[in-house]
Image: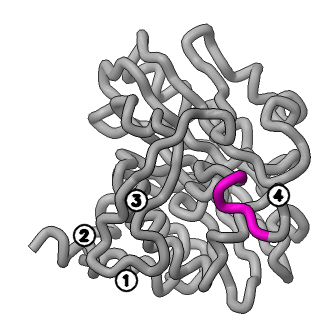
């Protein structure tokens, strides 16, 4: 399983990155891109406009007439439109591309397909996930610390899809319910509710962001100079950790084992 996951990921220098989308993007009518744009702070807290632009260019080349929907839910008091304006997102969009706030979209309850759900037997996320032909997660490479080291890449990036009104805890601007009993455990539920729907993943590893605490928008940047891409979220996140000198999170292998059970 591990060797298979490694072989399915492309790792290139940031300067050489040209996005090759998954087959499902070819001549698709609607494509969803979920980038990490949750904070009004530039890369590496969020994805760089360089990598986001390359991903959008690759998708447009694969499907010249597709409607490309960029969907994100923020993690701050600043609106998505304001964040996009500050970071320069709108300058990357052509007439067939649209930025949508995940918190404002109609929802659907997605069943948790895991043989052993951790906390959620189902999860609410935008209905549009099932109304597109191809889905891409575009994450930033970050390490924060909440009881233990937490790696954010393409799977953790999906947290932004879940409505804050439904999953908030003490703070209305965050999704505190998704931190209990722990983020690594809840990520198993995230994968088997919506993560398995994604057809591809990209991680902007040009800079690795490191925080000394739980705050994912305050820390330091470490030069890595790589972009990771592939058709499998787990494979991409594993390679990000290996190349980026981080331990592979336990949940990656846990999800891989559960996938095997489902496919037996």
Q: Is residue 55 above or below residue 165?
A: above
- The quadrant where residue 112 appears: bottom left
- Quote the CA–CA distance across marks 3 and 2: 23 Å
Q: Which badge, 3 or 2, comes first in the chain's sequence? A: 2
The numbered disc on residue 4 is: 2
Q: Earlier in the sequence, mark 1 or mark 4?
A: 4
Magenta residues?
165-169
Q: Which residue is mark 4?
A: 172
Q: Residues within 10 Å of mark 1 (few under 14, many from 20)?
A: few
Mark 1 or mark 4, whichever is nearer to me = 4
Looking at the image, which residue sits at the far left? 264
Q: Nearer the viewer, mark 2 or mark 4?
A: 4
**Comes first in the chain, label 2 or label 4:** 2
Residue 200 is one of the magenta-drawn residues: no
Question: Pointer 4: residues within 10 angstroms few (<14), some, or many (20+)?
Answer: some
Give the residue number, with chain letter if any, for mark 3: 193
CA separation in Å, label 1 and label 2: 16 Å
Which of pointers 3 and 1 lies earlier in the amino acid sequence?
3
Using a 10 Å C-alpha cutoff, classify the residue at mark 3 as few (fewer than 14 neighbours), some (14 to 19) or many (20 or more). Answer: many
- The mark nearer the N terminus, 4 or 3, is 4
Q: Residue at x 47, y 70 (%)?
A: 120
The picture places residue 166, in percent across and down from the top left corner, at 65, 56
Q: Which residue is mark 1?
A: 254
Badge 1 or badge 2: first in the primary sequence: 2
- Compute the Cα span from label 4 to label 3: 23 Å
At mark 2, the secondary structure is helix
Indicate the quadrant containing the N terminus: top left, top right, bottom left or bottom right. Answer: bottom left
Q: Nearer the viewer, mark 3 or mark 1?
A: 3
């Amino acid at each position: 399983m591990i060797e298979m996951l490694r072989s399915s990921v492309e790792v290139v220098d940031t300067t050489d990155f040209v996005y090759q989308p998954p087959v499902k993007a070819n001549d698709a009518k609607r494509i969803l891109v979920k980038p990490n744009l949750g904070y009004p702070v530039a890369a590496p807290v969020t994805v760089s406009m360089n990598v986001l632009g390359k991903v959008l260019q690759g998708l447009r080349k694969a499907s010249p007439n597709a409607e490309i929907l960029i969907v994100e839910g923020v993690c701050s008091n600043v609106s998505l439109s304001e964040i996009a304006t500050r970071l320069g997102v709108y300058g990357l969009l052509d007439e067939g591309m649209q930025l949508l706030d995940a918190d404002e979209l109609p929802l659907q309850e997605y069943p948790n397909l895991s043989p052993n759900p951790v906390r959620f037997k189902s999860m609410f996320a935008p209905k549009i996930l099932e109304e597109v032909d191809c889905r891409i997660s575009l994450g930033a490479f970050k390490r924060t610390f909440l009881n233990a080291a937490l790696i954010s890449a393409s799977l953790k990036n999906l947290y932004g899809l879940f409505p804050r009104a439904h999953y908030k805890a003490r703070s209305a601007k965050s999704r505190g319910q998704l931190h209990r009993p722990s983020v690594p455990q809840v990520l198993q539920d995230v994968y088997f509710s919506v993560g398995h729907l994604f057809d591809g993943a990209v991680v902007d590893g040009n800079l690795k962001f490191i925080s000394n605490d739980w705050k994912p928008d305050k820390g330091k940047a470490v030069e890595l100079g790589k972009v990771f891409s592939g058709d499998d979220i787990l494979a991409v996140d594993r390679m990000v950790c290996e190349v980026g000198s981080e331990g592979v999170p336990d949940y990656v292998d846990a999800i891989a084992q559960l996938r095997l059970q489902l496919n037996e």
